[in-house]
Image (tube, grey):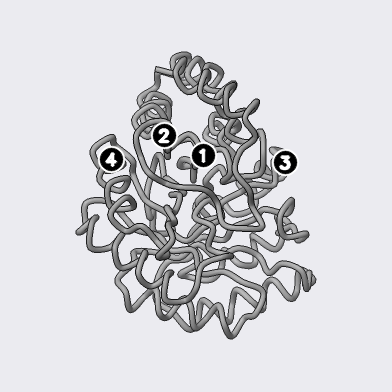
Amino acid sequence: MKKILFKGCGTAISTPFDENGINLKEFEKLLKFQIKNNADAIIVCGTTGESSTMSEKEKEEIISCAVKTSNGKIPIIAGAGGNNTAKVIENSKKAEQLGVDGLLIVTPYYNKCTQKGLINHYKEIAKNVSLPIILYNVPSRTGVNILPQTCFELSKIENIVAIKEASGNLSQVAQIAHLCGNNLNIYSGNDDQVLPVLSLGGLGVISVLSNVKPKYTHNMIQNFFDGNIEKAIQMQLKALPLIDSLFSEVNPIPVKSALNHIGFNFGIPRLPLTPLSKDKETILIDELNKLI
């Protein structure tokens, strides 16, 4: 059985920017809010964190801040993926030096490698770090899908411990669970599919929703594990309108607006992302206020 990095709600945390770069004071404020409200892990420098528009120095600053603020209370997992294997290894080693508990490695994008390329890419990364690795499958963004048989091959590698499955294909999730069993833990990468993934043996979610509703997301999953299945289902369904609003424009545009609304100063996304349109912001705020 592979190491379990976390079980429950892992927050794919947003990054607050200002004119000087990262607003570390606001980031630390959100981290403390997450820890206080039962988030089970923090994923920093991911898609929601806008890592693609952050400098190397900024990534080091925010990872260091997360590790220091958490101080071992909950696991810190750093996004370190990219489409240049050598650079991913460099990023992964740096994150390891900064004291994170695990790595989230997205599939290479744009150059669109084969399944053989995926296997070799991840093998090379895994042998150069000792940290546990979560594969990140999000073909809508990368143009590359990790097939179940490829997951099976990668699950044979000791420090490849899990997959964040954001393909939206529940049949594929079922196949991964069937082939890999306890050799590859599964996390939902979609907030609207948490319960279906849990029902297939998943361990939780890497969540956008939990930026603004960490306790709700944690409790939904905990209810499932405690056997309160009906309650967990009700919570999943009740959250759908807010989840839809959080993805009414490309993530993380809406969640930054939501964070600003609940009392954080997270500013606006970096270009090429733009602020949320006013009509969708009105709906988002309404749904945010409804979900208690």
Residue placed under numbered mark 2 in the picture: 212
Q: Residue 201's x, y, as percent? A: 52, 39
> For the residues carrying marks 1 and 3, which lies nearer the camera in this image?
1
Q: Quadrant of residue 43?
A: bottom left
Residue that label 4 marks: 33
Q: CA distance from mark 4 to mark 2?
A: 9 Å
Residue matched to label 3: 169
The mark nearer the N terminus, 1 or 3, is 3
Q: Secondary structure at mark 1?
A: helix
Q: Position of residue 40 (x, y in %)?
A: 33, 44
Q: Give the distance between the C-alpha atoms of the residues marked 1 and 3, in whole angstroms.
A: 24 Å
N-terminal of the pair, mark 1 or mark 2, is 2
Q: Earlier in the sequence, mark 4 or mark 2?
A: 4
Q: Position of residue 99 (x, y in %)?
A: 29, 71
Identify the residue under disc 1. Answer: 255
Apparent side of residue 21 relative to residue 86 in the rendered image (left or right): left
What is the C-alpha distance between the residues marked 3 and 4? 32 Å
Mark 4 closeness class: few <14, some 14–19, many ≥20 residues within 10 Å: some
The first of marks 1 and 4 along the sequence is 4
Labels 1 and 4 touching (C-beta < 8 A): no
Cβ atoms at labels 1 and 2 below 8 Å apart: yes
Q: Amino acid at mark 3?
A: Asn
Residue that lies at the very extreme toward the front in this rendered image: 19
Closer to the camera, 171 or 265?
265
